[in-house]
Image (cartoon, rainbow, N blue to C red):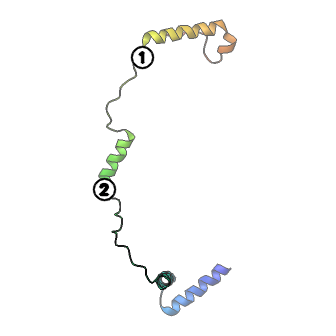
Amino acid sequence: MKNLLKTVRDSIAAAMNGRTIEQMETEQRQDAVNAAVDDYLTRHPDWKPSTKPAPKAAPVRDSKQKSKRIMKSLGVGAGTFTPHIVDEAALERARAKCRQLVASDPDRYSHIIESAPLRA
């Protein structure tokens, strides 16, 4: 209810001054900032503005630069795909050892590894 009354009051005040509510709020904010700055300057009469230049903003990048940067971060154009090198002899030894483990204790390993011979 309080917000409704405040809105109605602000609307009436804005209409009396020939402005919108947004314009009135903007003017109030600007007045508050000006009052705060004036108050600070009266309390600190020896204050002087900085002589250092303001920090520069980050350079604006166009969409082409952005897309190149994104593609580079995703790995596009990083080279061709190199397949993994598989040592067939080591793979065959691992398969044989696996078959041996499953055959020695099928109750323990049969739910993880099929006990049927693996395809070569």
Give the tally of numbered discs: 2
Q: Mark 1: give few (<14), some (14-19) or many (20+) Cα within 10 Å.
A: few
Q: Looking at the picture, how far across and down is residue 74, in whole percent?
A: 39, 41
Q: Is residue 64 left or right of residue 94?
A: left
Q: Is residue 97 visible?
A: yes
Label number found at residue 58: none
Relative vertical location of residue 38 with respect to residue 101 in this rendering, above or below? below
**Residue at screen point 32% across, 30% down:** 80
Q: Quadrant of the N terminus?
A: bottom right
- Where is mark 2, residue-wise? 62
- Where is mark 1, residue-wise? 86
Q: Is residue 120 visible?
A: no
Relative vertical location of residue 75 with respect to residue 25 in this rendering, above or below? above
| Residue type at the position of mark 1 | Val
Q: Which mark sits nearer the N-terminus, 2 or 1?
A: 2
| Residue type at the position of mark 2 | Asp
**Residue at screen point 43% across, 11% down:** 88
Q: The residue tagged with tag 1: helix, strand or loop?
A: loop
Q: Looking at the picture, how far across and down is residue 23, in whole percent?
A: 47, 83
Q: Is residue 107 left or right of residue 65?
A: right
Q: Nearer the viewer, residue 59 or 7?
A: 59
Q: Mark 2: give few (<14), some (14-19) or many (20+) Cα within 10 Å.
A: few
